[in-house]
Amino acid sequence: MNKTGLVLIALTLVASLMGPKPSAAEGAVAIASTGDVKKDGISIGAAVDRPTKEAAIAEAIKQCHEYADEHAPRITGLCKIVKTFRRQCFADAYDPKTGTPGAGWAIGSGRAAAEASALAACEATAGADRRGFCKGSGNTICDTHD
C-alpha cells in the first residue's frame, strides 16, 4: 500500500472517531398529585431512550402536563420530576374505578419487576375495600439503549 492509501485510511479512522457518538439513553418520570388521588386524580408522565437527561426530563414533564390537562385538570401545574433512570423500566397501575385512591408507579430492573412493584404500590393506596382491583396500565416502557 502506498503513502496516499495509508493517509486516507488514517484520515478515515480519525474522522470516524471524531464524529458524533450516540449518547447513553436516559429516562425520567414526572408526577402531579395533591396527595388526594380520590378527589384530585394523579398525572404521570414518563420518557425513555432520550439522548440526554435534560431531554428525558422535558418529555416526562410535557407528558405529565398533557395527561393532567385531560384527566386531572386541577393538578396541571404540579408536575415535577420524581426520578431519572437509565437501563430500567417504568410501569404504572391504577384502580380502574373512577374516584378511587388506588394508583402506583415503579422503576424496575426489567418489565416484570417494574409492573409487580407498580401493582403493589397501587394496592397499598387502594384502601381495604378496593385491594385486588388494581390493574397495570399496559403502558410499561423500558430504557433500552446505551
Image: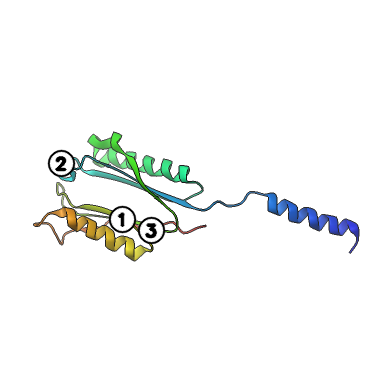
| Mark 2 in CB contact with mark 1 (< 8 angstroms) | no
Q: Quadrant of residue 112?
A: bottom left
Q: Which amino acid, by three-letter code, is at mark 2? A: Lys
User: Separation of disc 2 and disc 3 at Cα?
Assistant: 29 Å
Label 1 packing within 10 angstroms: few (<14), some (14-19), many (20+) = many
| Mark 1 in CB contact with mark 3 (< 8 angstroms) | no
Percent x, y for residue 45? Answer: 34, 46
Residue farthest to the left, as pictured: 129
Q: Residue beneath label 1, please?
A: 106
Determine the secondary structure under disc 1.
strand
User: Separation of disc 1 and disc 3 at Cα?
Assistant: 8 Å
In this view, 66 is above or below 87: above
Label 3 packing within 10 angstroms: few (<14), some (14-19), many (20+) = many
Please name the residue shown 23% across and 35% down the image: 74
In this view, 79 is above or below 126: above
Label 2 packing within 10 angstroms: few (<14), some (14-19), many (20+) = some
Percent x, y for residue 33? Answer: 24, 41
Percent x, y for residue 118? Answer: 27, 58
Q: Residue beneath label 3, please?
A: 89
User: Separation of disc 2 and disc 1 at Cα?
Assistant: 22 Å
- Between discs 1 and 3, the one toward the N terminus: 3
Q: Which amino acid, by three-letter code, is at mark 3? A: Cys
Please name the residue shown 24% across and 44% down the image: 42
Q: Residue beneath label 2, please?
A: 39
Determine the secondary structure under disc 2.
helix
- Between discs 2 and 1, the one toward the N terminus: 2
Please name the residue shown 33% across and 40% down the image: 80
Q: Which amino acid, by three-letter code, is at mark 1? A: Ala
Please name the residue shown 19% across and 45% down the image: 37
Mark 2 or 1, closer to the camera:
1
Percent x, y for residue 17? Answer: 69, 53
